[in-house]
Image: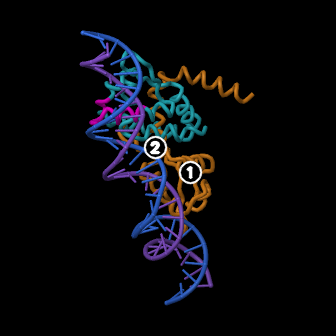
Chain colours: A orange, B cyan, C purple, D blue
DNA sequence: TTCTTTATTAGCACTCGTGTTAATTAATAT
DNA sequence: ATATTAATTAACACGAGTGCTAATAAAGAA
């Protein structure tokens, strides 16, 4: 479980996390479509996508002049299984968290 | 779900991730005990602990001259529930991951 | 008070990450 | 060939992050 830190590092930037959430919500998107997750230039987005790709979090596909990016479930499974493997440690507090969220939504 | 990125950012540094794993494995530890997770000075560890504390990942307790650090389950629950809320997306690949890990351990 | 132990803060150096614009590559169309 | 569209790479500026040593603070013991 060595590359977990690099996955976390990739997810730790707000712009990149916004890209991930966009891909989770809308599925495959081109670099151009992803640009508006932040008020940022195309080259900046391109490099964020490179970081995500190198961390194994996204796939890249070519379609005409576009580069289409999509999430790579395997990377999420790696992190997800790490959390689940320590679930007994935090599960109890999850109950309290859910109760708090429920209360908040009233 | 705003502070997820800052939690990921805190976990994204190798030294800090090592601290987290140490606390997961051994429970509460003093700043001094945690120093040997890396070949690093005491002030450096102290600042990493500050980052983890500000991200809400660890608790701080005073015992004699020592500062004792322990994990804060609520923070893990926050991230854990995020992953679980997207589990249907990556769960299938988790099966493949487990199969691969099982094969690897033979 | 003074000394010891433990940890943190201050100050500085240096690297890394992120942003920009300009230039380049890639794919396609005219 | 030339132009258009989409994306990336190059080159640079700059702030943030991390490491060190020295100084300071906090807690307790002599």
Lateral position of residue A67 relative to residue B64, left or right: right
Depth-wise, is mark 1 or mark 2 nearer the camera?
Answer: 1
Q: How many marks?
A: 2
Specify whether residue B76 is in view. Answer: yes
Discs 1 and 2 carry the same chain letter: yes
The disc label shown at residue A19, or none: 1
Q: Position of residue D22 (x, y in %)?
A: 28, 37
- What residue span does the magenta drawing correspond to? B35-49
Q: Position of residue B34 (x, y in %)?
A: 33, 27
Lateral position of residue D10 relative to residue A48, left or right: left
Lateral position of residue A42 relative to residue B101, left or right: right
**As drawn, which residue projects farthest toward the right?**
A106
Of residue A88 and residue B38, the one placed in the foreground of this image is B38
When asked about the image quadrant of residue B40, the answer is top left
The disc label shown at residue A94, or none: none
Please say if B90 is above or below B31.
Answer: below
> Which chain is indicated by disc 2?
A
**Residue for badge 2:** A75
Specify whether residue A59 is in view. Answer: no
Of residue A49 and residue B49, the one placed in the foreground of this image is B49
Q: Which residue lies at the image location 58% right of the left edge and 57% below the top edge?
A: A34
User: Does the segment drawn in magenta span residue B48?
Assistant: yes
Q: Position of residue A20 (x, y in %)?
A: 55, 48
Q: Which residue lies at the image location 54% right of the left edge and 69% below the top edge?
A: A65
Please say if A34 is above or below C5.
Answer: below
Between the residue at mark 1 and the residue at mark 2, the CA separation in whole angstroms equals 15 Å
């Amino acid at each position: 479980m060595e590359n977990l830190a690099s996955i976390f590092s990739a997810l730790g930037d707000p712009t990149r996390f916004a890209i991930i959430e966009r891909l989770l919500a809308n599925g495959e998107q081109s670099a151009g479509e992803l640009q508006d997750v932040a008020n940022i230039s195309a080259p900046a987005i391109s490099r964020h996508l490179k970081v995500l790709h190198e961390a194994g979090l996204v796939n890249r596909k070519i379609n005409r002049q576009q580069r289409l990016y999509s999430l790579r479930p395997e990377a999420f499974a790696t992190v997800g299984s790490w959390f689940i493997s320590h679930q007994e440690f935090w599960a109890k507090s999850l109950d309290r968290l859910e109760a708090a969220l429920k209360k908040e939504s009233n």
